[in-house]
Image (tube, rainbow, N blue to C red):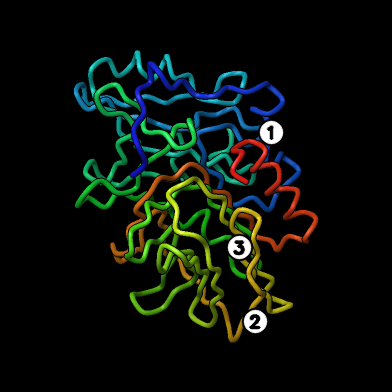
Amino acid sequence: MSVLFDISSKIVLEGDSTEALNYVFDSSDTDVVAAYSFRRLSPDYYGALISVRNKELDTQKDFYPLSNGKIDENELMSYLGDSQAFLVNFYNQAVNDKTYNNPANTDGNSYAPTNPRQPRIVLDKILNRTNALISAPLSQGAAIDYLEVDSSSSNQITGDMFAYFVGAHDGSSSTNAMFSKRIDDSTKEYEFIYTTPTNVQYSDSNSSVDLAVSASSDLRIHSFNRDKSANIIDLQVNGTFSNSNPISGTINTTTSKLYIGARPDDNYPFLGDFQELVIFNSYKSTNDKTAILDGVNKYYNVY
């Protein structure tokens, strides 16, 4: 878990409106399957970003973006009072999903299934932050906090795929799953993990590719790009590429849920903070991939 900063002394960096509204996609990008973030990712999305539970009152409230694309922290803290805040739901901002502009419909959204699994984003009036931005800790001591995505979104991925994950690894030595979708305990449809604090890996039941990284708890932008027809997978972390590896055999598909921050067998919790995940059901050219990741980095200022 990242260091908690006192909200009175570490206010979120707003930036100018151009930077804050640096969108990742719009309604013309119909290949976006899943998009979860504490910021507005598309100019065509008008729904809530997250839903938060007030522990003391046991109530739940949706939070919408301000004109700068970010959550109103004053509204959030006013709603909580002296209570703790737990993240219940990340609403899917994907334009081709049934939840588009309809956050009341949970189909395709990312949610914490039970109270003990909900990431705690506010404790003692202190927001959990990474790089001065709100983040969700996906592990709290012995508890494994994770988010689930039902199959309506994740089943749209059957071959080509591009995804990026913005988060901070805490440097622990155990295997950490950023996100994963599995058929059973021994067969992966796909999995994006830290196998060690210095190795990031994409794998499925037939192939894998690794990328060496430095051990750090700083925020990172991770991505992988899978071209099924050309048999190519490559990884990128903060601008550093892996060597492309061939795909062998058939990529498995299943109707199971996508898990963010753990494996579906309740193992490999991601011991760090989560801020953003976007998944496309297409392979991206070098130019398109660079444009997306450069835009994401412009917002987060990671590398």
Give me the disc on residue 55: none
Q: What residue lies at 40% left-to-right and 38% top-to-bottom?
A: 89
Between 103 and 83, the one nearer to me in the picture: 83
Name which residue type carries label 2: Pro
- From the image, tell me which residue sits under label 3: 224
For label 1, count other residues whose C-alpha is less than 10 Å away and answer few (under 14), some (14-19) or many (20+): many
Q: Secondary structure at mark 2?
A: loop
Q: Residues within 10 Å of mark 3 (few under 14, many from 20)?
A: many
Q: Earlier in the sequence, mark 2 or mark 3?
A: 3
Q: Disc 3 residue type?
A: Phe
The disc at residue 246 is: 2
Which residue type does callout 1 highlight?
Asn
Residue highlighted by disc 1: 22
What separation in Å lies between label 2 and label 3 (alpha carbons)?
Answer: 13 Å
Q: Is residue 245 above or below residue 239?
A: below
CA gap between label 1 and label 2 equals 34 Å
The location of residue 302, given as percent across then percent down, is 59, 43
Instruction: Verify CB contact (< 8 Å) between mark 2 and mark 3.
Output: no
User: Residues under labels 1 and 3: Cα distance?
Assistant: 21 Å
| Residue 208 coordinates in the image, percent (x, y) | 54, 77
User: Which numbered disc, 1 or 3, marks the residue that appears first in the sequence?
Assistant: 1
Residue 238: percent from left, percent from top:
61, 53
Name the residue: 74% across, 53% down. 290
